[in-house]
Amino acid sequence: MNKKSIVVTGGLGFIGSNLIEVLISQNYNVINVDKESYSSNYYNVKDIKNNSKYNYYKCDIFDKKKIEYIFNKHQPIGIFNLAAETHVDRSIDNPNNFVKSNIVSFFNFLETFKKYCKKNPRTKLIHISTDEVYGDIARGRSDENYAYLPNSPYAASKAASDHLLRSYIQTYKIPAIITNCSNNYGPKQHPEKLIPKVIFNIINNKNIPLYGKGKNIREWIYVKDHCAALIKIFKSGKLGESYNIGSNNNLSNYQLVKHLIKVAEKKIKIGNNVKIIYVKDRPGHDFRYALNSKKLKKNLNWNIKIYLSDGLDKTFSWYLNNLSYFKTLDQKDINMRFGLKL
């Protein structure tokens, strides 16, 4: 195996591209595998695309033959799987894509990895999942032993992928770890998601739509903190285990938007149309997510480094300094509301 080669699937996306940057900065050779969906963006890797430590393959993880070729050619010591459909609203409109990508394609990928790790037993698979698999957390925080109770087709498809991997760990003894992370934010996130959507609307003097009454609560982590946790888990995590990755920082969507507006006021002149408006809620909208990340903190000595105020400031500045990023996207993916079909 190549001691410094890492495969990242979904590396043209938000978290994947940020992870690749961190890995390259730590002297790893990174092989980016991405099928190029609507949320993939070459803009996200423009600063590393010519780096000698970066390789790219357009490939769906469903494609066993090509994935096997990539594994055998590059002999990675680690694989970070971030290839997934992730937008809850889209999963309400079209759950079929989520079942195909997050379950069926992942099954094919697992079969290929199972074959590869027989010849390369020192490799590791880190499968990146979500806090949404635990469902609505009315009180307290969900730890790694908490029951899975997904409430959207997206969350259910991710829960299924976690269960499938867990079965392969138990049955086939594959070297793998599952991670479940809270809501990420930071540079390069597609503006179908809340924070970049709000930033886009503020910059463009548009109303800011909030579902329901804006009281839904989420736990927010800066993407580079998530990446640092993933690398720490890869290096020191226990095979066969799962780890929650969270910031312990929960806010309502209303509180978050008000915070973002304050950040914006320090950077630009806010237009008259920048007002919060309440819109029809998402079907099956979980009220609160909250992770217990004590296992990761205690066993692997990990903690967040970027707190919300700094993180939102960095994030707003990135979008303000990269306005051309928005031009690389289909405008309907920014402006169109998904998830209302019932």
Image (cartoon, helix red, strand yellow):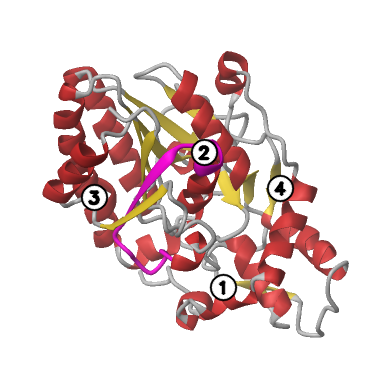
Tag of residue 325: 1
- x%, y% of residue 145? 44, 21
Q: Which residue is the extreme one toward the right?
A: 266
- x%, y% of residue 260? 76, 62
Q: Residues within 10 Å of mark 3 (few under 14, many from 20)?
A: many
N-terminal label among 1 and 4: 4
Location of residue 299 (image quadrant): top right
Q: Nearer the viewer, residue 41 or 155?
A: 41
N-terminal label among 4 and 3: 3
Question: Are the residues tagged 1 and 4 within 8 Å (C-beta)?
Answer: no
Magenta-colored span: 24-41
N-terminal label among 4 and 2: 2
Tag of residue 251: 4
The quarter of the image holding the N terminus is: top left
Q: Is residue 11 above or below residue 39?
A: above
In this view, the mark in front (1 or 2): 1
The quarter of the image holding the C terminus is: bottom left
Q: CA distance from mark 1 to mark 4?
A: 27 Å
* Residue 26 magenta-highlighted: yes
